[in-house]
Structures are given as C-alpha cells and as structure tokens.
Image: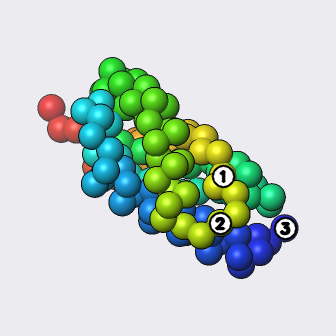
Amino acid sequence: MARPQRLRRIEDQIQRELSALLHSELKDPRVGLVTLTGVEVSSDLTHAKVFFTMLGDDQAKAQCIEGIARATGFLRSQLGRRIDLRVVPELHFHYDASVEHGMNLSRLIDEANAGPKAE
C-alpha cells in the first residue's frame, strides 16, 4: 500500500531535523559520524523507526548504538521544538546494515569480474 504524502513529508522532515541535531547538538563522543538512511513513522504518528549507518568496527558500532540510545530522550525533546506536530513520535533507532551488505556485494562482484589471479 502506498504511503500517504503527508506521512512521507513528516518522515523527511524528521530525518532532516534529527540529522542536524546529531551533527550539531549531540556532544556524546561515542556517537561519531552517523548517517540517517531513513525514517518510518506509524500512521498515528506515535512511533518513528529511525534507520542509521556508520563506518567502523563492531566495537565502535556498539558504542555508537549505546550513545544514541542514551540520547533518545534529548533528541525527541529537541525534535519537538523544531517540528510542529501535536505528538512527537517516540524514536526507535535501528542500525541499517544494508550499506555494508551493498559494499560486500560490490567487492564480490569486482573480484568475480577480475577473474582468476595469475600466479
């Protein structure tokens, strides 16, 4: 089913504002360079799944996830000040591994196209 245009606009606005908040307002050193890849808002606007990705090893990712989890309340309150909604959605952050998966597939395709290595 197609998403209503209003929900798409709200999702885009939440993504832009959260991205700005993460890069300018959040001072947690555990949260490094994070890229928001998408936002899905429930139809009643009470919950928002925020998908993010970052580069780094597993330890850096775990620290980043922990830092974002601790900052969720702050991010939600700041988001409420920046957007005009009756109810600010509860934020649920999810790590998006699709970028890593795509990079892995690209590497495998490049290796397959290179052919056998001459020894």
Farthest residue, direction right = 1
Task: Classify 10 Å Cα crowding around label 1: few (below 14), some (14-19), many (20 and above).
Answer: some
Verify CB contact (< 8 Å) between mark 2 and mark 1: yes
Q: Amino acid at mark 2?
A: Leu
Q: Which of the two discs, 2 and 3, labels the residue nearer the N terminus?
A: 3
Disc 2 to disc 3, C-alpha distance: 24 Å
Disc 3 to disc 1, C-alpha distance: 22 Å
**Above or below for 27 versus 85:** above
Element under disc 2 = loop
Percent from the top left, x then y, of residue 65?
Answer: 44, 30
Pick the quarter of the image with the C terminus: top left
Q: Residue at x 47, y 47 (%)?
A: 75
In the shown orientation, is residue 118 left or right of residue 78?
left
Task: Classify 10 Å Cα crowding around label 3: few (below 14), some (14-19), many (20 and above).
Answer: few
Q: Disc number at residue 89?
A: 1
State the residue position of label 2.
85
Pick the quarter of the image with the N terminus: bottom right
**Which of 5 and 57 lies nearest the eye of the viewer?**
5
**Which of 42 and 51 lies nearest the eye of the viewer?**
42
**Which of 84 and 46 lies nearest the eye of the viewer?**
84
Q: Amino acid at mark 3?
A: Met
Q: Amino acid at mark 1?
A: Pro
Residue 97 visible? The answer is: no
State the residue position of label 3.
1
Residue 67 visible? The answer is: yes
Residue 4 occupies which quadrant of the picture?
bottom right
Disc 2 to disc 1, C-alpha distance: 9 Å
Element under disc 1 = loop
